[in-house]
Amino acid sequence: MTAIAMPDLSVRLGKLELPYPTLMGSGCYGSGDEFASFADLRKIGAVVLKSVTREPRLGNPTPRLVHVAAGMLNAIGLQNPGIDWYLEHDVPKFAGRPCVLIGSVAGFSIDDYAYVCERLASRDEIAAIEVNISCPNVASEGETFACDPRLTEKVVRAVRSTTDKTLIVKLSPNVTDIAGIARAAEAAGADALAVVNTVRGMAIDVETWRPRLGNVTGGLSGPAIRPIAVLAVYEVARAVKIPIVGQGGIETVSDALEFLLAGASAIGIGTANFTDPRVPERIVAGLSDYLQRRGLSTIAELTGKANVGRLSAAQIEGDAG
Amino acid sequence: MQPALDHNARVHVTSVIDRRVVAPGVISLGFRAPELARAARGGHYVMAVPPTGEAAAVALGIYEADDNRISLLFFLTGKRTRELGALRPGDELSMFGPLGNGFDLTKPPKRATIVAGGVGIASVLLAAEELLRAGSRVELLYGARSSAYLVDAKRFARLGCDVAVSTDDGSAGHHGFVTQLLEQRKPPELLLACGPSPMLRAVAASAARMGVRAQLSLEETFACGVGGCWGCVVPLSAESAQAPSFPPGDRGGSDVVYARICKEGPVFWSDELRW
Ligand SMILES: Cc1cc2nc3c(=O)[nH]c(=O)nc-3n(C[C@H](O)[C@H](O)[C@H](O)COP(=O)(O)OP(=O)(O)OC[C@H]3O[C@@H](n4cnc5c(N)ncnc54)[C@H](O)[C@@H]3O)c2cc1C
Ligand SMILES: Cc1cc2nc3c(=O)[nH]c(=O)nc-3n(C[C@H](O)[C@H](O)[C@H](O)COP(=O)(O)O)c2cc1C
Ligand code: FES
């Protein structure tokens, strides 16, 4: 094998350039500093901050978490202090963080999304905006934006008109035609798509016969949803030209590679941080090794390269070379 | 409450140096972990990563700590603790911590009472040692299912604690709840407790009747263990000093705010809880 220079792991999402392709999933990494003692924030691509709404939200009753086979169910219910408090008290603390911070916006009306996005995007501390149109844990119409292509298009158009910063639209796996929703988001001006948010789920305590979450239902994350998420990335990648942040159960280098091969340009890591905060760093090192071993110089050379046709023996040998 | 020592917080890879089955289905594991051991105070916990790495980390109180070694004491309840319980001396484990705000022992009183229920004993040994060192007289009220589950009761007595025990089945000490022992006592100057939620609620009620404040170490399912996910919350009075510093939001006229047990706790003042 010929020795090559260190592979380039940087990625570009719209105008946003990231040194590494790993984004910490919204709601899983707080505002970054919670993990600062356990993970090297300089070795991650970006932290997607917890979603913020127009009004403060108390969130759902407890219990909010259940560990299940190969993952967990959560029903936090978007607990957050509301955009006013957030801008005044939280955002100033973000200055000087050693990693890129991406804001996340949630809402209950198109007007809410546009308002929160505009105010958040006006701050220098926030490099880009993720639009969470897919939270499964709020009782009202929160999720319908990601379930209907016309609503997706309307909400994305509205936020698009408020900012020039990179807009990442986060899609829900709880739909029949995710490609249609993805096309609607692209048409309305999204710069990138995050695929996917959690899968709706439920767990019941067989002793008490009661649901194990205070909110009855929740969102499933972790390895349990990985094949669902890989398929979603694959379908979305064939439908749009904009980059995809693939996420759902990524824990290892090979998990990350699956998402890239399915069509992702970058990857999101959420639940795996709860098992071991060093996972993101390990994935970055592993991706670098993999590229070198394969004689590739950039991550982009992997994106969408899953070969879903039959490979000839020559092709396989060529790839392995 | 006693703040966690964040600068000492790291991911530690340690190896098991001893393993004891201390009661049916209750395991104690000792680790060589000097940094952790020196930073650990009463009420601190670690997040221990199950060895296959397939399941989320588990929150476990730091039971013992000296210059070099810490130990954890846990019930085999589910998948993750069973994985930990299968470890043998020499096996490696990663954990991060110490985490959380421990018991506030900054003003050691003449007399302190500690109420421990079941495996809650794991979070109070360091506090008892610290109080005894500071010259406090410490009474441990210790309740368990049966005598077999009264882990290390004699050890607390040897340390110098006055120990009174209770069991659900009457096989040792008072037949009934440990909180009934507390009801027979004079109001203590300092009251600490760790155990199952129903016990903690009863301690809070007794404390209120006695006109004292108790420090309760709470439990809830954790995901991140460091304050990043808002999954482990408990309702607190909005005026509580431990309430997270933001407005409680759409609370429909109620006076509560959700605080993270892992970050703002796990030790809370009984009169500030609204659970
Ligand atoms: C700050 C903190 C400190 C803790 N310290 C300790 C400690 O020192 N020792 C210790 O043993 N535990 C301790 N715990 C509790 C421990 O983290 C949980 O019991 C853990 O979730 C068990 O993980 P598991 O995967 O084995 O079981 P899970 O899969 O989470 O649970 C399996 C089943 O057991 C039930 N269950 C869970 N916990 C208990 C329990 N305690 N008693 C009876 N049933 C239960 C669950 O409802 C579920 O049905 C602590 C928790 C916190 C938050
Ligand atoms: C506890 C928890 C809280 C979450 N909160 C949010 C949120 O506020 N906004 C959002 O867009 N996604 C949220 N998510 C979804 C994650 O960002 C991610 O899309 C999902 O968990 C799948 O990835 P994973 O399997 O790597 O965790 C949350 C997930 C978890 C587990
Ligand atoms: S477990 Fe994540 S905030 Fe407490």
Image (cartoon, coloured by chain):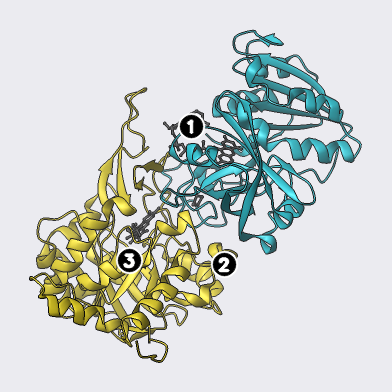
Chain colours: A yellow, B cyan
- Label 1: which residue? B77
Q: Chain of mark 1?
A: B
Task: Residue B72 in the image: state x and y as whole percent.
Answer: 64, 40
Quadrant where the image shows the N terminus of chain A: bottom left
Neighbor class of circle 3 (other Cα within 10 Å; few <14, some 14-19, many 20+) is some
B235 vs A246: above or below: above
The disc at residue A36 is 2
**A127 sits to left or right of B220:** left
- Of the numbered discs 3 and 2, the one sitting upstream in the chain is 2
Q: Is mark 2 within 8 Å of ligand 3?
A: no
The residues bearing labels 3 and 2 have C-alpha atoms spaced at a distance of 25 Å
Residue B252: which quarter of the image? top left
Task: Residue B186 in the image: state x and y as whole percent.
Answer: 80, 19
User: Which of the four quarters of the rendered structure image does ligand 2 lie in?
Assistant: bottom left
Residue B8: which quarter of the image? bottom right
- Dot 2 amino acid type: Ala
The residues bearing labels 3 and 1 have C-alpha atoms spaced at a distance of 31 Å
Q: Chain of mark 3?
A: A
The disc at residue A254 is 3
